[in-house]
Amino acid sequence: MPSPALSRRQMLQQVSCGFGGLALAGLQQQEAQARTAAGDSSLMPRLGLHGPRAKRVIFIFMQGGPSQVDSFDYKPALVEADGKGYDFVGVRFGTFGEKSQRRLMKPLWDFQQRGNCGQWVSELFPEIGKHVDDLCFLHGMHTEGVAHGPSTLFLHTGATNLVRPSMGSWISYGLGTENQNVPGFITINPADSKGGPRNYSNAFLPAVHQGTAIGKAGQSAVNARFQNIANAQLTRSVQERQFELLQQLNRAQQQRRALRNSHQAANDSLEAMIESYELAWRMQMNAPELTDLSGESRETQALYGIGEKKTDDFGRQCLLARRMAEAGVRFIQVNYSDESPTPRWDQHSNMPKHLEHARATDKPVAGLLADLKARGLLEDTLVWWGGEFGRTPFSQNNDGRDHNPRGFTVWLAGGGVRPGMAYGATDELGDTAVDGRVHMHDLHATILHLLGLDHEKLTYRYAGRDFRLTDLHGRVVKDILA
């Protein structure tokens, strides 16, 4: 029996030939690496500057801009004003600053109050409507840009005209990953247009923080797999020798850290490249299991609408997102997008098309919320649903709606936000944010805050300047925090 005077450290060192001490030393080494300066480019898990409410983010991107006045932002005045004239000042190319008369168009679907919170939800989203007591609606959103490309880039990177890191890359850079065998940032079925790879690019951040794409917009999620995960040209023994060489190079690089000089940038690039190769090796052993849904029960797959014609594809994407969140991925983008000139929710002349897209996504998203909650993951997983902007309350081409960056709705769930809450408001017609205004920079700052990161201190020095996701703007919306 060890003496009562022995410390825990001494006991671990002496009991069972000291194997406990080895384990403790390993854990201490990981913790030391986790506390390295923000300049560390590795994927080791790191601590934020304050206690995090969320460990990870699932962003459900509704490309094209869902109409807030037809979905979650109920406006009785718009119903009453249906068909009346509306004085509008243009914000699009060719109409900027010009005044014109437009015809108001009421919602095409009826609204009703849902849940204990009484949030208004239209008939478009009956399944999501069942979860409103877990959601936090931001009705006063506004953003930059009036076209899909710039606005989508701004949503993902905080900039419209410069190549900047995606939000997922910033989060990976700031926090690392909870699982060293998978990337810290994964995007599911992304589009090649409207920002394309820039929407998940690491830009000037170390290469290891680049978003890993699985699948592609316009292709079935059945084929969403990690690409080039196996090497058919080299035997396993040769690959192991290559991996050992990379490890030797990495160890040599680490030994030179204390002697860094004017070749700092080159050293960092080499180290990031080595780390990305090492991650690829670890992924070969572990990542393929992430995209294999065959082990999921029939009940779970049915929850997401898998097996149903309308919901099978997006249901698979949402189930993949849950599996990745469970595996320790920090930031997961789920893209409801395609490669057409007008993205899926972009109805300039056919608003009834919204019903088709709502039916394809409503049940899968509701299934994701229910599954996360049942597994205890919703508490520390922040779910973010929204598009790059909203749509106008007046008609375009008879039964369509134009882009609207001045006021629209997104919602959040879990991860430390107040449930069953509606924050902010647009004007009585649903056109412009007038109360509780939240700029996209503010939303970015708030999400980083929930992850334990300070948007003003999460910076990276590049080309002689300290860059950050929110540039020189952004504030944490504290009113929505639980």
Image (cartoon, grey):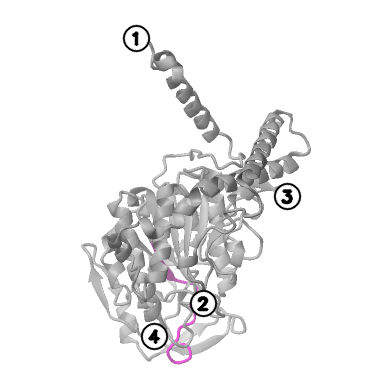
Residue 81 to residue 286: above or below = below
Task: From the top left corner, tell me how far across and down residue 183 is, in percent.
Answer: 53, 49
- Residue under label 3, please give it: 463
> Earlier along the polypeptide chain: callout 1 or callout 4?
1
Q: Amino acid at mark 2?
A: Pro
Tell me if label 1 and label 3 are in contact, CB under 8 Å. Answer: no
Q: Secondary structure at mark 1?
A: loop
For the residues marked 3 and 4, what is the alpha-carbon distance in whole angstroms? 48 Å
Q: Amino acid at mark 4?
A: Pro
Q: Secondary structure at mark 3?
A: loop
For the residues marked 1 and 4, what is the alpha-carbon distance in whole angstroms? 75 Å
- Residue found at x 61% / y 48%: 208
Residue 365 to residue 283: above or below = below
Q: Quadrant of residue 351?
A: bottom left
Between 207 and 1, the one lying in front of the other is 1
> Earlier along the polypeptide chain: callout 3 or callout 4?
4
Q: Residue furthest right?
A: 262
**Is 61 part of what is drawn in magenta?**
no
Residue 19 to residue 480: above or below = above
Q: Which mark is residue 352?
A: 4
Tag 4: Cα neighbours inside 10 Å, few (<14), some, or many (≥20)?
few
- Residue under label 2, please give it: 343
The region drawn magenta spans 396-411
Task: From the top left corner, tell me how far across and down residue 152 is, in percent.
Answer: 55, 68
- Residue found at x 36% / y 76%: 309
Task: Indicate which label's residue lies in the foreground, 1 or 2.
Answer: 1
Quick check: 67 left or right of 243?
left
